[in-house]
Amino acid sequence: MSAPSVPRERVRRRRDDTRLALAFILPATIGLVVFYFWPLLRGIWLSFTSWDLLSPAQFVGLENYRAMVADPVFWNAVRVTLLYVVINIGLQTVVALVIAVLMQRLSRSTLLRSLVLAPYLVSNVVAALVFLWILDFQLGIGNQVLEWIGLERIGFFTSEAWAIPTIAVVNVWRHMGYTALLIFAGLQAIPPTTYEAARVDGASEVRTFFGITLPLLRPILGLVLIISVIGSFQVFDSVAVTTNGGPVDASRVLQLYIYDKAFAQFDFGYASALSVAMLLILVVVTFFQYRVTRAGQTDLN
Amino acid sequence: MTETTTAPVEPETVGQTDPPRTAQPRRRRRPPSPGRVLAWVVMIVLLLLTLFPFYWMLRTALSSNGALYSGSTSLLPVGFSWGGFERVFGLQSTEEAIAQGGSGASIDFWLYLRNSVVVATVVTACQVFFSAMAAYAFSRLRWRGRNAVFAVFLLSLMVPAIFTLLPNFVLIRDLGLVDTLLGIMLPGLFMTPFAIFFLRQFFMNVSTEVEEAALIDGASKVRVFFAIIIPMSVGPIATISILTYIGSWNDYFWPLMVSYTDESRVLTVALGNFNAQTPQTGPDWAGLMAATLVAALPMILLFLVFAKRIVNSIGFSGIK
């Protein structure tokens, strides 16, 4: 862009900053190699060993994987985790979409968006503890309200059927505002002219939403889904704090099982194999989501 | 964890690029349409659901356990008492605490608070600074292999955080750093691919003119980084710092793995423990809610100050 006739400029442009650049990326590279790539390799290696942290790790080949395939607790954990993800993501996406569309139609005030985002500011642990109290069987206001409208009390965290849906809803509470803001940002990218055209044709709000907004939002919705599904699969905090996997194994999600195997039973080899399984599940799910939602492509041009 | 792959936008740019309002043509002096009223009703209900738990935390924290156990549904604090907060801050004797439904176990709140502050502050400062350095090298310096190396950094976005936790714990253990604050901080000190990616976007857009003028005046590229790029990117740097601080403050799984004693216990882990020490009589709900409120308070304050920046930072324009 600058005038090409200035020779001094051209000389500097060609100057090579390699040494300085290497110095500048050195700390980040240490972080990348030591805390991302090395653990990735080490995790995969550990999954082929038997190791209790004390004696040296022993190579056992596919033994851990063989045990895993035959392990009913593992399959249960996969089932529970999938159930959690489906409820969590399904509900969260719908609620977030509603909030985002309402925000766009009603008001763009920063105050409103801040209030919506507020739950995202507290930790999973805080969110889980608050709902542990609100939904307490005896004293929780949630159950008192249920009784007041004439329904049965529900053991939200203590019954096998309710534990996972409850935890899923708690995390919807924490993340829906964040997801709504992401979708809201996507809505801003849809040119207003498309809406005007629809209005001229006399399309109703509902029709406009399903006919225009939703299809044009697809790429962004796809990305939001991929991001939140990856996050959702890694659920741990809220389960560890509230039910710790119970009752029985009803909420023993994959992460919790991995943690138990490693830190309660000191079976690091098996825990690593479980982590690899988790990684594979994530890769497959992400790949299919990407294909199905065509998240990378836009219909806007 | 969810925020790591979305690229925030700066408030300033958002303000400018906002498309014009798509709202229906204004019909003044007419009552709002029924659809609009319904929409507001739905929005307000959703807002109430969003905010109620915060109020309930406060209401319970200011109640006494005795009154809570009578099952009152009053919306105001029942049996008003500062007892919950007093137990959190260790202002009650063991007997007093037990009499009021606490566990009586000593919790060193100030120590956990200090630990959380140290961890979040050091991680944020180092991570943002080192990421900014790398982002500078990837955006403003000329060197061979720049794009290839950057691609390798982007690859690490694909490694789910959760997969690295276990091997990282093994590494921290090998280094003899289990149960130390350094052990908790170390993996996050150097960078996150997201922070590099995010800052690079902004560094690339800093005008080259000032930089060239400085270079002609004989400034080094190092000086350009400190005297030009950083000051001109205060906005994005603040944004990524706030996001990092919040994430670090709220982290639970990793500190849970690494810390075993009070020495290195951070607030989130302490809260989990506080919950686990249920007294014989039943949970100390007033104390627990007081503790959660106090743990969440710094983030709520941060949010009050920076709400606009945080809210506007959530978007997609960096990704396209």
Image: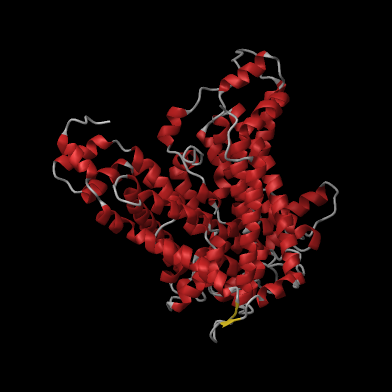
Q: Residue furthest bottom?
A: A55
Q: Residue furthest left?
A: B217
Q: Does residue B61 lie above or below A42 as drawn?
A: above
Say which quadrant the C terminus of chain A sits in: top right
Q: Is residue B285 left or right of residue B149?
A: right
The spot of residue B306 in percent (x, y) is 44, 43
Q: How is the image coloured?
A: secondary structure
The spot of residue B236 in percent (x, y) is 39, 43
Front residue of this view, candidates A165 and A276: A276
Q: Does residue A38 lie above or below A95 as drawn?
A: below
Q: Is residue B239 left or right of residue A98?
A: left
Q: Is residue B277 visible?
A: no
Give the residue at x 22% y 46%: A15
Q: Does residue B257 lie above or below A297 as drawn?
A: below
Front residue of this view, candidates A235 and B136: B136
The spot of residue B95 in percent (x, y) is 58, 76
Say which quadrant the N terminus of chain A sits in: top left
The spot of residue B283 in percent (x, y) is 67, 67
Q: Is residue B132 visible?
A: yes
Which quadrant of the view contains residue B79? bottom right
Q: How many marks?
A: 0
Front residue of this view, candidates B287 and A193: A193
Q: Does residue A186 lie above or below B102 as drawn?
A: above
Give the residue at x 62% y 12%: B29
Which quadrant of the view contains residue B126? bottom left
